[in-house]
Image: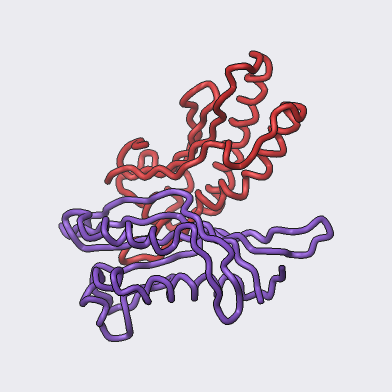
Chain colours: A purple, B red
Amino acid sequence: MTVNGLELTTVDEWIYSTLAGDNTLVGYLGDGGSSPGGPGVFMDTIRDDTTYPYVIGNLMISMDTLTSSGDSLIVVADYTIKGVDRAVNYDVLAHMHQRMFQLLHNQSGTTADGRVLKCLRQRQVKYSRINETIQYRHLGGIYRFWVEGL
Amino acid sequence: MAMGPGTIQVVIRKNNVASWSQRLRARVAMELEASAQRTLTAASSAAPVRTGELADSGEVRRRGPLSFIVVFGVGLPDGRAIYQELGTSHHDAQPYLYPSFQMEIPTLMQRLAITTQGRIKVMPGMLGSSVGISAV
């Protein structure tokens, strides 16, 4: 196993390709995922013109797993991956949440720069916010990734 | 898991200790509380600062003989403790509590191994931990 410094972008790319490439999930997104710029799946930051609901992933923390000699073997990274909706209930988000779990939990995959050895959901997150009478809801999970470079 | 409006918390606890002596339980409780305090300190330092209220809003609470909570958002009028940790539709996430707890876990495991003199093998999955989000 190796570390090439691209492990986190590997995770980003794998999350995006896995979620944005799924017709079922994309079908729940704003404009049915056909909004300009591509499906409503984002890493780190959304676009200004994003329509609801959308999916966003954020790195929370990453750790290099070291050998006794100090050589890095793999990177372990925790991401928040959630759906966000402007709605008075969690109805659509619940479907998105369930689908994201199916697509990510206990899965693995490869990108051009690295390999996601395993993804496991650690816990779920759910909260809402009211901003000037508009309700925003968030539903998703914290997922842990074990990743190595190629 | 709800603690009150706008709070976020991590739980540090140890289960399945029925066969432990009172002395050992007391030692483990001290380690868990110390771990919670270290998590609180680290999270306070990592919390994004605008007014400083978020960093000052954290505290450790004991909720059982071997269970402690690190909670942020105490006394704040809004849900910024959650919003900063996990983000909103208008602001990106700036997590401070969950990463601090994850960084603490190896130290806690090491301390518990010493405290129990190796009689109890502590695995990460045996440490009860969660991020609890209250309704706002």
Q: Residue at x 84, y 59 (%)?
A: A69
Looking at the picture, how far across and down is residue B93, in whole percent? 42, 61
Q: Position of residue B49 (x, y in %)?
A: 47, 56
Q: Residue furthest bottom?
A: A36
Image point (69%, 58%), residue name: A65
In-image side of A21 versus A9 (left or right): left
Q: Give residue B88's position: percent from left, percent from top.
A: 33, 61
Q: Is residue B14 above or below residue A110?
A: above
Q: Is residue B48 visible?
A: no
- At 30% from the left and 57% from the top, the residue drawn is A138
Nearest the eye: B7 or B115: B115
Q: Residue furthest right?
A: A69
Residue at the farthest top position: B22
Task: Residue B115: name its quadrant.
Answer: top right
| Image height of B104 relative to A112, above or below | above
The residue lying toward the viewer, choosing from A111 and B22, is A111
Q: Locate the N terminus of chain B by quadrant.
A: top left
Image quadrant where residue B29 sits:
top right
Task: Using the image, determine if residue B99 lies above or below residue A74.
Answer: above
Residue B51 in view: yes
Q: Residue at x 28, y 86 (%)?
A: A36
The percent position of residue A51, horizontal first and vertical second, equals: 24, 74
Reply above or below: A45 against B32. below
Q: How many marks?
A: 0
